[in-house]
Amino acid sequence: MLTHTADILALTTTLKMAAVTTFILLIIGTPLAWWLANMKSRFKVLFEAIVALPLVLPPTVLGFYLLLAFSPQSLPGQLWQTTTGNQLAFSFSAIVIGSVLYSLPFVVQPLQKAFEQLGDHYLEAAAMLGAGPADRFFSIVVPLTKASFITATALGFAHTVGEFGVVLMIGGNIPGETRVLSIALFDHVEAFNYSNAHLLSAGLLISSLLLLSFVYLLGGKYGRKNSNKSPKTLAKVKNKHVNS
Amino acid sequence: MSKNLTQSLPGKALNLTITTNISFEQFNLSVNEELTLAGITGIFGESGSGKSTLLRIIAGLEKRADGQLNFNGKELQNSKKRHFTKPEHRNIGLIFQDSRLFPHLSVLENLTYAVKRKHQPVLSMEKILQLTQLTELQHQNVTRLSGGEKQRVSLARALLAEPELLLLDEPFSALDKKTKAQMLQIVKTIQQQLDMPMLYVSHSISELQFIAKQLIVMSDGSIGYIAPTHQAIHQLNSHEDIAVKTSLSLTITEHLPKFGLSQLAFSAKSSDNHIYLPLLQQDQQQSTIGQLLPCIIYARDISISTTKPEHSSIVNQLPGTITEIKQGITSALVKVQCAQQEFYAQISLWSATRMALTLNSQVYIQFKANAVHSFHSTESENHA
């Protein structure tokens, strides 16, 4: 019974962490994706590589550097402590920051791809009708890349739920604060408590599968619908100089 | 008639001063010109001559362009002062070749997109829907429209933003001839009704001849010359790769359905020197008696006779005086002045020699009714 309440607490902590992380990711990932999509510099690849790093880097590497940065002895850790009064390492804030960095490519990449595909044709048309940059973004870009926003949100959320290494390194295992499902599962296995481990594993497996199915369902639906509308195919006829 | 009244009004004129320079990999545009824009001004040039780029610079879509742009007393761009007015603040409209309708919005929503961003809209939606013949289509999904319908929505949307100047970048080049003719007429009528100056880019002379009052002729990234349409087209006759033609506007004087012809004259008053062409479609507003009709007659379709051809089937015969003879390799180009109008006739060198044509000699020019081309006449026409 006790383990069940602990697991439910781990579940709520996980959902809270994933929700806050996804929200922050959309806030910072959207402008970052826009910036990358419109970047003309030859350093673009470098920035793209930085954003993609968490895809290939062992999470423990990221966790290790973050742990160093979050410690009260280092500058970011110190700044955090003086402004908030709390220690950053082994806190909920720490695992959120870690998750944001770790799940960044899952949000930025689909958005960047969508922005690049959209091109500037509709945006030019909107500008000629008097729409300013923010207006154009919300009235044209967001509705036309809606599917990618949904994909980015779902992938960011799912990936954060499934996180282990970074949280373990910088969060520790504090119930209600940093003890998330993947860590609770690890504890059960360590304690040879396989029935609980099965429950958590199966739960994570099924919910992840459902979420991904939903993403692909939407991707297929919008992907087909939007393929007829691709602005790039419309304009390939002309303006060889203009669009070069 | 109110239509004639608006036509005879001088119309709004705008001033556009442009000094600009822009370089692309294999192309350089350099323009330094002061333009007075009233009615529809055409921009003609081969593809790659820079006409679309010039429009984009005026619209504010080419930020890399260097130079200065003054429009109607406002400085829109000054590279020296690092001043650049964004396209959304220029109050200039642009219609693209690919209509660029917003696919997530219906026809009506595309139109209200423009209205919502206008501070004090004056034009009524109903009027614009009616002028662009969209009333029936307003609730349609834009992705299901035909090419001509799309461009009508694009036109209506641009008009509802109520720009001071409307730029049209080859808007109808992807349309079939019949739809194009309808669209040109719509644009012409709208221009007259709203008195909105327009800059119309095209690589089709016949399209521009039908719609524009004056022509800006561009080549290789610069403006060659600016002249009233007929004059500009005659100036183009010296280009080797352009078919020599006579461009003129004639007044419709009578329809002769019994003979399948319509009768035109150089002016409404002159009773002689009629020109006949295949019967104009009567349902069109522009075929009313008294209207001016822009026409093109190719030089290769005009023949010359030294005596009045009494026994000829050719309906158009005009007396005139030879003012110029230019000998080519296989043919001669003869310029003939008939009353106020000059005509270009292309005849074989052999004929020119045999007939011993000289300057100032009196001749008759002849051409068949179906040699007179106009953008809205019968379907059998063939345009350059």
Image (spheres, coloured by chain):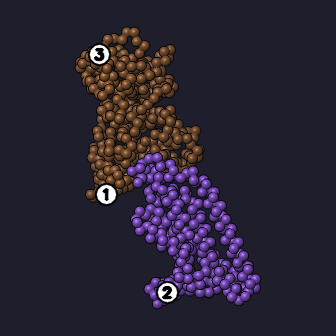
Chain colours: A purple, B brown
Q: CA distance from mark 1 to mark 3?
A: 65 Å
Q: Position of residue A147 (x, y in %)?
A: 59, 60
| Viewer-side residue, B38 vs B146 | B146
Q: CA distance from mark 2 to mark 3?
A: 102 Å
Vertical side of A53 occupied by A147: above or below: above
Residue ID at (60%, 73%): A159
**SS at mark 3?**
helix
Disc 3: which residue: B355
Vertical side of B103 occupied by B347: above or below: above
Disc 2: which residue: A68
Disc 1: which residue: B83
Residue B78 visible here = yes
| Viewer-side residue, A61 vs B17 | A61
Vertical side of B142 occupied by B345: above or below: above
At label 3, the amino acid type is: Met
Badge 2 density bin: few <14, some 14–19, many ≥20, Cα 10 Å:
some
User: In the visual, does A27 lie left or right of B83?
Assistant: right
CB under 8 Å between discs 1 and 3: no
**Placement of the N terminus of chain B among the 4 image quadrants:** top left
Q: Earlier in the sequence, mark 1 or mark 3?
A: 1
Both on one chain, marks 2 and 1? no
**SS at mark 2?**
helix
Foreground: disc 2 or disc 3: 3
